[in-house]
Structure formats: C-alpha cells, structure tokens
Image: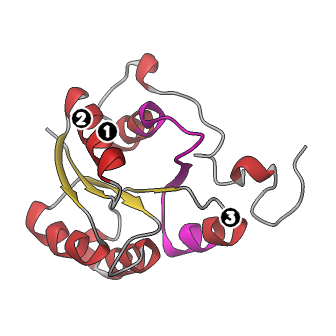
Amino acid sequence: MKKVLVIEDDLVAATGYGRLLQANGFAVASVRDGAAGLRQLAVFRPDAVILDLMLPKVSGLDVLRAIRADSAFRELPILMVTNACLPIFVSEALEAGANRIFDKSNDTALAIIGVLHDLLRTSSDSRLVVPTNTGNPDICFDTCQDVSGRRSD
C-alpha cells in the first residue's frame, strides 16, 4: 500500500483528502502545519505528499524546498494545492520542485487522486485519471494566463 502525507491546515480539506485517499487504497498521515509536515516526513516515509502552499509555522514553499534539499526525498512526488493561484506562486512552486499544482477552488480531489495514481503507477484504470487544467504547469489557473503571464486564450 502506497503512503501519502497530507500537509494541510484546513481541517475540512485535510479530512476530505484523507478519506478519498483511503478509499482509493492509500495509507494516509495528515498534519496541519509545515513544521509538523517536515517532522512527519522522516517518520512516515511517504511515497507522495499533498502539500498546501499557505501553511502556518513553515510555508508550503519552504517545506517543498526543504524536502527537495534532502537527497532521500529529492524524487518524492509532491502535489501542491492552493487557493492562491497567482502566477508568481505557481512559478515559485514549480521552480522549487513541485510535480503539479492544483487550484483548490477549481480542481477536484479526484483529479489529485488520478495524478497520484499516475505518478505512483498504482492504477491503470482510466476512470481514476481525471483531466484538469490547473494540474498542467503551462496553465495559470483561472487567470487564463500561462506562467510567463501571457494570455492563453
């Protein structure tokens, strides 16, 4: 069973991710701030991380940078989630090593599960892979701009 660490300060979102992950065959650990996320990473040894961008104590970007700086976790799939889908945040997260970035208000949790299954090669069931605009790093969410700031429509 693959393990996913959810680092999310919103209790409702964390609970929702956790329940859906468990229903899809993942073991889940969940923490509510960035400092706890870094501590739990070494204990839980996840196969992937769902990481909120805006966290108390240590920001999601700083957690991401710390994970990527550790050779033991350099290749760990990290999916960032945020309500602050601004081009600068997207660029910084991608440069820091996020595999994908999801807009909490526009992307479904099922889309995140689909990407996890794809990255971890845990399912070949195409019904579990849901296309998403914002999981694509070339799209800058609901502003209809790519990460360079150019309009894409």
Q: How is the image coloured?
A: secondary structure
Callout count: 3
Q: Return the disc, 3 or 2, that comes first in the chain's sequence.
A: 2
Q: Is residue 147 above or below residue 70?
A: above
The amino acid pointed to by label 2 is: Arg
Proximity of marks 2 and 1: CB atoms separated by less than 8 Å: yes
Q: Which residue is label 2 attached to?
A: 19
Residue 45: say if magenta.
no
Q: Is residue 54 above or below residue 81?
A: below
Quadrant in the picture for the N terminus: top left
The amino acid pointed to by label 3 is: Leu
Residue 97: say if magenta.
yes
Q: Which residue is label 1 attached to?
A: 16
Q: Residue at x 62, y 65 (%)?
A: 90
> Mark 3 to mark 2: distance in Å?
28 Å
Q: What is the secondary structure assignment of the residue under circle 3?
A: loop
Q: Residue at x 81, y 49 (%)?
A: 144
Residue 45's mark? none
The amino acid pointed to by label 1 is: Gly
Q: What is the secondary structure assignment of the residue under circle 2?
A: helix
Q: Which residue is label 3 attached to?
A: 86
Q: Position of residue 43 (x, y in %)?
A: 8, 67
Q: Position of residue 135 (x, y in %)?
A: 58, 46
Q: What is the secondary structure assignment of the residue under circle 1?
A: helix
Quadrant in the picture for the C terminus: top right
Q: Return the disc, 3 or 1, that comes first in the chain's sequence.
A: 1
Give the magenta range.
92-112
> Mark 3 to mark 1: distance in Å?
24 Å
